[in-house]
Image (cartoon, helix red, strand yellow):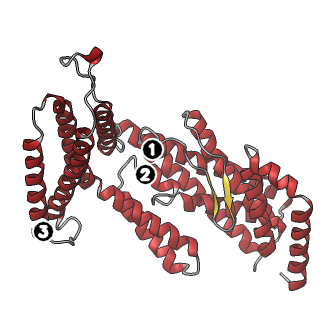
Amino acid sequence: MKAKTRSTLTAIGVFLLAKFKWVIALLKWSKFGGTLFSMAASLSAYALFFGWKFAIAIVYLIFVHEMGHLVAARHKGIATSPAMFIPFVGAMISMKERPRDAATEAYLAYGGPLAGLLSFLPAVLLYQVDQVPFWALVIYLGATINLFNLLPVSPLDGGRIVSVLSTKIWLFGLAALLALVVAFPDSPMMYVILLIGIFSWWNRAREGYRSEVLGYEKEKLERLAAMLRDWPKLTSTLPLKMALAAEAEEAMKHRGKLRKWSIPFLHDKEKFAREKAEIDLNYVMRTRELLQEWEHQPVLYEDGDPDRPVPSELLEHAVRKAEADIAVIQEEQTRYRTYYKSSSAVKWKVLIAYLLLAGVLSGFMLYGYRLMELYTL
């Protein structure tokens, strides 16, 4: 694009921003204002570098893809944010709640590339009618964008779909993505997706270890809740203080014998022992603080009767807090155990649907590429 043209577009943009600030403010506070404003920003950015026809085509393709996710989410009753466009990156929606399982997440993910396939099918018919090269570009772009999204790497749609089959497939997807990074080293987005993919795989690989740590923390919280319920029955807090001091000393001594660094998987046993010591120390500190605060509170009695002490609001609140923390841990542990579990029937359906969509998109990508070659020879 010539410098004169760019300067003209920039001047127009500045003029519009100056004259229509009220429109931008209205869009910002409306339900779909963010979508419209970010779409306009992406459209302008693409047009600035590649021209308006290309900009309209790619924004349209991305928009339909994201609408596929939104429709799938609505069908499953999952609330989402409106679509937000990011120039030269694409667009995204965020879920306001976590899907109950990987199969539901796969359904939401599949909606994007499926809608993406439907988005460029009209271009196939239009090309047959008038043979305009622009329609060939739309076919190629639509198929390529959606096929790339089917790479079995989280957070791409393909990674979320194949997680129903096995998250170990993410490793093959990472290898394929790494090959693309080597082939196209000038694409910053490839590096970002690769890093996120590695992070996602790592989190999944470490879920078993985290569940074990959470299990120990749950045991300590259960012990704390039981202890707090017994405090009003104590005749003296001295034995409790001595027991807490001894426990803290033992935890510090044990922690001091363990190395401060560890190699994941190889040193998990030692790392777990160190984390247990840290949890023990945190538990002692939390208990001491509660004990100190409780001891300084006056004891109240119902109608002044010494045999009817009023339950301590501090202790009751602490018990509720411990029980709430236990519930969160139990929910997380249940998710670790069950989120990726699916029946054989569901796995077969997902596999067939994934391969079929990938195959159709591959065919259209080659078709679009060959059509474009006709006009570049």
Real-space Cα distance between discs 2 and 1?
8 Å
Which of the two marks, 3 or 1, is nearer to us in this view? Answer: 3
- Bin the neighbour count of mark 2 within 10 Å (Cα to Cα): few under 14, some 14-19, many 20 and up: many
Going by the numbered disc 1, the residue's amino acid type is Val
Question: Are the residues at dot 2 and dot 3 in contact (C-beta closer than 8 Å)?
Answer: no
Which of the two marks, 2 or 3, is nearer to us in this view? Answer: 3
- Which sits earlier in the primary sequence, circle 2 or circle 1? 2
Query: Does residue 42 lie above or below 161 as drawn?
Result: below
Instruction: Residue under label 1, please give it.
Output: 350
Question: Are the residues at dot 2 and dot 1 in contact (C-beta closer than 8 Å)?
Answer: yes
Front-lying residue, 231 or 178:
231
Front-lying residue, 65 or 233:
233
Using residue 278 as the reference point, say whether residue 195 is left or right of it.
Answer: right
Going by the numbered disc 3, the residue's amino acid type is Gly
Instruction: Residue under label 2, please give it.
Output: 162
Query: Does residue 315 lie above or below 278 as drawn?
Result: above
Real-space Cα distance between discs 2 and 3?
44 Å
Which of the two marks, 2 or 1, is nearer to us in this view? Answer: 2
Using residue 211 as the reference point, say whether residue 269 is left or right of it.
Answer: left
Quadrant that contains the N terminus: bottom right
Front-lying residue, 199 or 239:
239
- Bin the neighbour count of mark 1 within 10 Å (Cα to Cα): few under 14, some 14-19, many 20 and up: many
Q: Residue at x 76, y 78 (%)?
A: 376
Going by the numbered disc 2, the residue's amino acid type is Val
**Element at label 2:** helix
Q: Residue at x 86, y 79 (%)?
A: 6
**Element at label 1:** helix
Q: Residue 92 appears at what percent x and percent y?
A: 61, 54
Instruction: Residue under label 3, please give it.
Output: 256
